[in-house]
Image: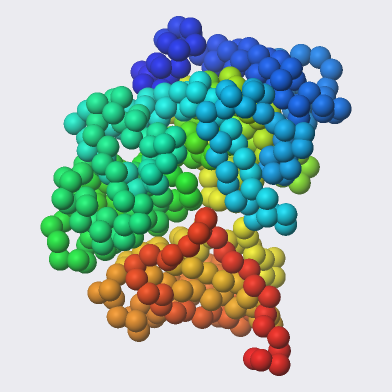
Amino acid sequence: MTTPLDDRLAVLHGLPLDFDRAALEALQFVRLAETIAHARARSPFYRDRTDWPEGPIDGRAALARLPFTTPDDLVRADPPLAAVSAGEIERIVTQPTSGTTGAPKRVGFSAEDREATLDFFHHGMTLFTGPEDRVAIAFPADRPGGVGDGLAAALRRLGATPLIMPSDATPEEFADFLRRERATMAAGPPVRLLAAARVSRFDGGAPIRLRAVLVSSDHASGALRRGLERAWGAAVHDHWGMTETGYGGAVECGAHAGLHVREADLLVEVIDPATGAVCPMGEPGEVVVTTLGRRAMPLLRYRTGDRGRLIDAPCACGSRLLRLVGLDGRLDGDVAIDGRRFGMPRLDEILFGVDGVCDFEVRFVDGAPPTLAVSVAAVSAWPDTALVAAVEAAVASDGLVGPLVATGRLRLAVGRSEGTIVARRGKRRLVREEAPCAAFT
Ligand SMILES: [Zn+2]
């Protein structure tokens, strides 16, 4: 048994169709040697590094000797990371960062780099998409070369029909769009999909049934996945990736037991974020990626700041590709009270468990005790009082946050935000605030 991703990898890189992990890893380290040679010859950043180890990087143990590349290196870009001339860079993605300098991260891609991503999208989507599918795309698709645009191109390659949603569509408009366009699938950020799914159950329109949905670009909690399955009957497939991985990174197969890594193009490690040591297979830590074959801006041992763990056990789908699991957000997003840590993944699990909640925003305000201020966007059919009571009850029944509220170590303030989705720029995150000056409280 095999999968379209495994077969494509074999065909593209000259492996037998029944390749085993040893053959795949041998291929990865051949590609790594080429990538290192290219980076050391052409990228000022990698050429000038003085902490480079001696000897060949011919396996995972040797790889661990390479120094890390960090998001700060991308922000500083001094020396520049690019390993091709400016003319060969077809697209530069500029990303705002929350760093102190406020300078953006810039990641460049060559035409070959973008083709590798399109090919991964194409064969990754083939895991659960066919030519008969009509796929509503809720990722921004207005810029050529962006995620939505790339996904649409990949879907056309496999014969399916991409349906591009306006990027400013409300959840109500999204639900109407799915009905009008007779969509069989949807793809987008998880909360945009959930908000449309919940709205569609209460708006009086015809029930929407989707075969499958692809969620990407944010953590998809179990409660959110259950909400999508319940509203639309959809099988949920998660995707993990970031600009630095060339968007595509790992995709969930029909076995729904982890995300298969794009291993021909990425060497993934998991490290202890405190010590930098590589974690044993299966242990959680920070996901680190090394790009294989990337031309414009190779990244060697790039620290993503994302939590996850790798598993190498065979998957029920037949794929031999490693799986990423436990991808539950950023390492730096938690707050701690009396040694109890929680962040957005936990809050997603609690709040999206309340039927009718479409989205929410949380501020953690320092104080004695600190306050968790939750502003909830919900379907209009839910009255304010019932909504607030349901959210308070959900928090109270949570084994971690509930006792903090019950014993007065954390104050909970629940309010309702307008509409069915929260207007925000950038990622959903737990916002930390200093307490206002005592004189004004
Ligand atoms: Zn699988």
**What residue sits 64% from the left and 23% below the top?**
85
**Residue 118 against residue 406 in the figure, above or below:** above
Return the x and y of residue 294 as percentages of the image width and height.
59, 23
Q: Residue at 29% across / 25% down in the picture? A: 158
Please state if 143 lies on the left or on the right of 52 as rendered: left
The quarter of the picture where the C terminus appears is bottom right
Q: Quadrant of residue 146?
A: top left
- When the figure is inspected, residue 349 is found, relative to residue 319, above or below; the finding is below
Residue depicted at x 44% and y 34%: 145
Q: Is residue 209 left or right of residue 359?
A: left
**Quarter holding residue 37:** top right
Residue 230 or residue 76, whichever sits in front: 76
> Residue 259: x and y, percent?
46, 35
Q: Nearer the viewer, residue 16 or 393?
A: 16
Q: Name the residue rendered at 68%, 75% in the picture.
A: 434
Image coordinates for residue 90, horizontal then vertical, percent = 52, 28
Q: How many marks?
A: 0
Q: Dividing the image into 4 quarters, which one contains the N terminus?
A: top left
Query: Is residue 370 something one can see in this rendering?
Result: yes
Q: Is residue 370 above or below residue 313?
A: below
